[in-house]
Amino acid sequence: MRSTDYVLKRGFFALVTIFVALTINFFLFRVLPGTAVTNIARVPHGSPQLQHALTVEFGLDKPKWQQYLIYLKNLLHGNMGVSFTYQQPVSHLLIQDLKNTIPMVTVGTLAAIVIGVITGVLSAWRRGSVPDHVSTNAAIFFYAFPTQWLGLMLLIIFAGTLPAGGMQNPFVFGTEPFLQHLTDIGQHMILPAATLTLTAYGSYTLIVRSSMLETMGEDYVLTARAKGLPPRRVIRRHAFRNAMLPLLTLVALDLGFIVGGAVLIEVIFSWPGIGLAMYQAIGQRDYPMLQGGFLILTVAVIFLNFVADLLYFRLDPRISE
Amino acid sequence: MTLPLQDPLLSAEGEGQPSHRTGFFRTVLRERKSAVVGLSIIVFFVVLSIIAPYISPHSVTQPSCAVYAPPSSEHWLGCDDGGIDMLSLIMQGGRISLIVGFAATLVAMIIGGGVGLLSGYFGGAVDVSLMRVTDYLLVIPDLVLMMVIADLWGASLFHVIIVIGILEWTSTARVIRAQVMSVRERVYVKRARGMGAGNTRILSRHILPQVGPLLIANTVLTVAIAIYLETALAFLGLEDPSVTTWGTILEHAFERTAIAAGAWWAIVPVGFAIAAVIVGCFLLGQAVEDALNPRLRVAHLALRPWRMRPLVGRGPGAI
């Protein structure tokens, strides 16, 4: 009973957050100086008749609350408007981009978590040693540099040896075997995913290290050691599991940061994902694309936060008490 | 005094005298090497950016060497695509970057500190509604929202400052709220209320001084985040094109094919400048925060020399 309560509560929170994001999106669009017809439809000097016709066509003569309802209704039908640049529905374009973004971000983030956990646990285990200092300082180093700078560095260092831009070899036409296609994409993914890993892993290392140190000071760990369990087993079975909980919180909170980093990374490596689409939309004043990108990324982050909440509940039943 | 040593100011200064914040910060600087290092880095860059126009070796508007000229004895860090000395650019770009960092942080601190104070002090419906807003903003990816707002408003320095300020206050609000909630219950606050002090007086005379150091620690940490975000927004072309900041230097180097030209000097040094300021802010902010948190004085916890963004837990009352 308690668990369903918890799930419902977190689910409700996620839904309300999505709703807040939708509302921010709506009002941002409408508090612009000038009207939507002069700014958004890009006819700044249309005749009064044309402007009036456009106002009616876009439903901008209706009261704001009615416009808001129409906006919500359209979103429910997956209608995010039409891109100015591509003259195609934003939702179709962005779904395509999302399919490119997800694998890159997933690989980069998972690699960051794995590296962060390994270096963090080793640092805590051998604290005060040379490897501990090296890994802690490296984590601080990579954390402090801006994402785009790390990306540019990888670009300078590996530009000749690894593909530096795009998602696949432009001279490959889709007729080659599937495996070869996959290898091609994989090679193109190395640099962007590695940048994301470098920019995100530092904080994971440090949080795992401090959380391991904290857990290793607990009484039950002392008890386990007093029982004569081998240190490896104490670390793995007793300390490690509880020490992972703060990491989950951090990863969930970090998702917004990761998504922001992904935008920068996609720009640097021309990875055809949502971030690159938003960047190009900025250059082309393509507001529907920009707004659509914001919505999709925000909903994705909110959804993943919800998943993290559920995972946390599963891993740590104490929070329902 | 049998009070548990929860109060960093009391414990830093002993016998519960009315606190002088300067005394507390002097103690932090004396006891923590990282605070001194962090503060020195920040002071170095602040002084550098103040005197930059007078000591820059070359002009930042007039070309003084060849396009992407490599580092030489004349131009220590080489030149950019317009033949402008990189060292001078970085020195003067730091001015605007630091101004954006500090100004945006000021906005964030006013909002976050205000929300935290009101929420923690009044509790009840005020607390619930303010914390809801905070929770929602905490989840929405900030850089992405900033991109949308900055683009809609148009590229300008002022907009960048405001956008960063109005979105980066959430963790401060949470931390301050938690602290205020504990200070509010202390005996001396109750005593002041018993003597007839009003809300305004209690907040300004009794609570604000107690959360002040924590607010300052958060300020320093937020400066680092604001500078990071400024470089990100500038890199995406959302900074005023007429100003030079560390962010626009990186953007220009990327846009104007510094990499294809092999001009690493247009990219590497500015990255180190940004990273140095960020590390400086984190070292100082972390040192103050650790000094304020008595839990971290317990031996095995104090080993942790570094913490990242403030961990905001879940559930009521969590920081």
Image (cartoon, coloured by chain):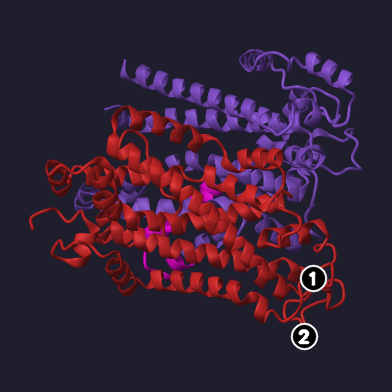
| Image chain in purple | A
B109 above or below B91?
A: above
Q: Mark 2 points at which residue?
A: B74
Residue matched to label 1: B61
Identify the image quadrant of residue A124: bottom left
Q: Distance between the residues labelled 1 and 2?
A: 17 Å
Seen from the viewer's position, the closer of residues A300 and A77 is A77
Q: Is mark 1 on a helix, strand or loop?
A: loop
The chief SS type of the magenta part is helix
Please tell me which residue is depicted at 53% across the width and 62% down the height of the picture. Answer: B278
* Front residue of this view, candidates A315 and B223: B223
Magenta stretch: residue B153 in it? no
Picture quadrant of residue A58: top right
Expressed as whole percent of the image width and height from the top left, the position of residue B229 reads 60, 51
The magenta span reads A112-134
Q: Which residue lies furthest to the left in this view?
A: B2
Q: Judge if badges 1 and 2 mark residues of a common chain.
A: yes
